[in-house]
Image (spheres, rainbow, N blue to C red):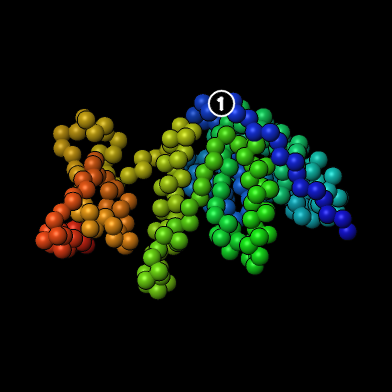
């Protein structure tokens, strides 16, 4: 049985505008395993928008999964039907939604449709390192994954007007702390919270979407301009502590108005580092 040729990437649009209505629907694209569905849940929850996955919508409309429909009706008819479904979703849900597009459906015509949608809406290409995608897909040959990502990245880059690299939090855990993380049930939760915070910060700055919640809800002053505050808070971090791989710099600076990096003498180094860690334990 002959295999179909990979979709032809559309040409990137260098002049795609990046100023959109604050209620414009946000589209997420990406290869399988990049985490676009999880990011879609983050955005949907934070913005209180409806989350739509194109593969699920395809099954609701046709009564068959994309794979089953393709096997029964052939590739050409499948792509034609998927294009109709995608156009229906874009027409019906142009505002106040999060749409996650399945990677397997984007033939040339679908790419052109998404590229056209990108003139009025944020379309975000989600990337992830090959090792994490390989682990998710369960493929033993890294070369196959690299080739897959090279093709898909070229396609998605031509359809999108933003790119977001979905950093794998687990890879940031030092090797000597991995054994502890396996017994710590909070680790996956904290990794997801960090991923959520990073993505929402990206959405707030890139798309200016409406109703993105404050990124530091635990601190009431987070919505008050620093220059308007009667009192401000700075964190002092000794250089010796800042270079420690176990130091979570984001956890320390959260809620602070400024971070001061202290270069101490050798005699002061040990004392200040111990003082910092006691303060973190207290917080």
Residue 98 locus on image (x, y percent): 57, 40
Identify the residue shown where x is 28% and y is 57%: 243
Extreme residue toward the front, this view: 266
- Please state if 69 lies on the left or on the right of 17 as rendered: right
Residue 2 locus on image (x, y percent): 87, 55
In depth, the one of 145 and 23 nearer the eye is: 145
Does residue 276 show up? Answer: yes
Q: Quadrant of the N terminus?
A: bottom right
In depth, the one of 6 and 89 nearer the eye is: 6
Identify the residue shown where x is 41% and y is 53%: 193
Q: Is residue 86 above or below residue 30?
A: above
Q: Quadrant of the C terminus?
A: bottom left
Identify the residue shown where x is 48% and y is 56%: 168
Q: Bin the neighbour count of mark 1 within 10 Å (Cα to Cα): few under 14, some 14-19, many 20 and up.
A: few
Q: Quadrant of residue 26?
A: top right
Determine the secondary structure under disc 1. Answer: loop
Residue 171 locus on image (x, y percent): 45, 61
In depth, the one of 206 and 84 nearer the eye is: 206
Extreme residue toward the left, this view: 267
Q: Is residue 267 above or below residue 49?
A: below
Q: Which residue is mark 1?
A: 17
In depth, the one of 42 and 195 nearer the eye is: 195
Extreme residue toward the right, this view: 1
Identify the residue shown where x is 22% and y is 48%: 261
Residue 20 locus on image (x, y percent): 53, 27
């Amino acid at each position: 049985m002959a295999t179909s040729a990979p979709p032809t990437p559309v040409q990137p649009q260098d002049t795609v505008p990046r100023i959109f209505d604050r209620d414009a629907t946000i589209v997420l694209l990406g290869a399988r395993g990049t985490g676009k569905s999880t990011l879609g849940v983050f955005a949907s929850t934070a913005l209180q928008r409806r989350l739509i996955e194109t593969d699920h919508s395809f099954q609701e409309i046709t009564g068959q999964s994309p794979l089953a429909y393709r096997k029964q009706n052939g590739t050409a008819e499948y792509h034609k039907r998927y294009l109709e479904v995608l156009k229906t979703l874009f027409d019906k849900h142009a505002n106040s939604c999060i749409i996650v597009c399945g990677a397997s459906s984007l033939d040339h015509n679908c790419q052109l449709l998404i590229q056209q949608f990108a003139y009025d809406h944020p379309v975000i290409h989600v990337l992830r390192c090959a090792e994490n995608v390989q682990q998710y897909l369960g493929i033993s040959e890294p070369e196959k994954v690299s080739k897959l990502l090279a093709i898909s990245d070229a396609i998605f880059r031509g359809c999108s007007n933003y790119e977001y690299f979905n950093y794998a939090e687990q890879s940031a855990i030092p090797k000597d702390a991995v054994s502890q993380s396996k017994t710590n049930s909070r680790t996956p939760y904290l990794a997801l919270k960090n991923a959520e915070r990073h993505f929402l910060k990206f959405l707030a700055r890139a798309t200016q979407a409406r109703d993105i919640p404050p990124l530091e809800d635990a601190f009431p002053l987070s919505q008050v301009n620093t220059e308007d505050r009667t009192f401000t808070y700075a964190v002092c971090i000794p250089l010796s502590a800042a270079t420690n791989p176990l130091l979570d710099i984001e956890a320390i600076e959260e809620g602070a108005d400024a971070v001061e990096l202290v270069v101490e003498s050798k005699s002061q180094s040990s004392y200040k580092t111990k003082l910092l860690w006691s303060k973190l334990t207290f917080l």
